[in-house]
Amino acid sequence: MIDAKPVLQTIALRKQYDMGKAKVEAVAGIDIMVREGEFVALMGPSGCGKSTWLYLLGGLVGATRGAGGVQGTRGTRGPRYISIVSQVVVPLGICALVQAISGLESHNIWQAILIGHMLRCGLSVIRFRQGKWRDIVVDIGPARA
């Protein structure tokens, strides 16, 4: 698996919010590399920066310091970017908002997932109409036995 190319990488990624006189560090220097085929679980207590980290990866908020991103998101906003934003960042953001306002119920989760799928359809249509999909190279590689 070491030969597999990185699909997600962050180096000293930080996000700090200025709250008047106080500064809150939501993400404090995350270094991670996830290679193709690896599985990652993001876990932690409420308020530890999980959603902020996903927002940083999805490009929804800018980093205070550091660098990182998802393979295929540099200026092309390709299929991986669309998938992460529509299937992870948006549904989690909706669930967090509903939880903060009124309490989260099962139907809210299904609504968030449905909105994420609708967003994915819309972003995919926009991406297709831009015509840049013609330049995307897909390396299928040899068949596995």
Image (cartoon, rainbow, N blue to C red):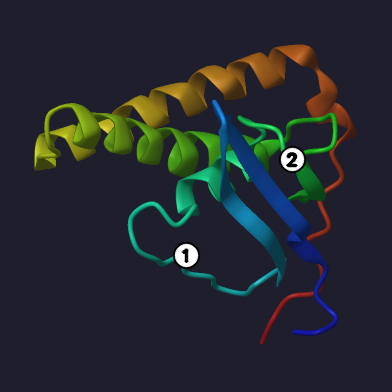
Query: In the image shown, does 73 or 43 lie closer to the viewer?
Result: 43
**Quarter that holds the C terminus:** bottom right
| Nearer the camera: disc 1 or disc 2 | 2
Mark 2 falls on what kind of element?
A: loop
Which label was assigned to residue 66? none
The answer to whether residue 70 is above or below residue 122 is below
Q: Give percent across and percent down for residue 128.
A: 69, 20
Kind of residue at disc 1:
Leu
Kind of residue at disc 2:
Thr
Which residue matches tag 2? 64
**Quarter that holds the N terminus:** bottom right
Q: Give percent across and percent down for residue 63.
A: 72, 40
Q: Is residue 45 left or right of residue 16?
A: left
Structural distance between the alpha carbons of marks 1 and 2: 21 Å
Mark 1 falls on what kind of element?
A: loop
How many numbered marks does the figure carry? 2
Mark yes or no: residue 129 visible. yes
Quarter of the view holding residue 22: top right
Mark yes or no: residue 110 visible. no
Q: Is residue 4 left or right of residue 121?
A: right
Q: Give percent across and percent down for residue 46.
A: 33, 55
Q: Residues within 10 Å of mark 2 (few under 14, many from 20)?
A: some
Q: Is residue 118 left or right of residue 69?
A: left
Q: Give percent across and percent down for residue 102.
A: 12, 29
Q: Residues within 10 Å of mark 1 (few under 14, many from 20)?
A: few
Q: Identify which residue is drawn at 71% across, 12% down.
A: 129
Residue furthest to the front in view is: 21
Which residue matches tag 1? 42
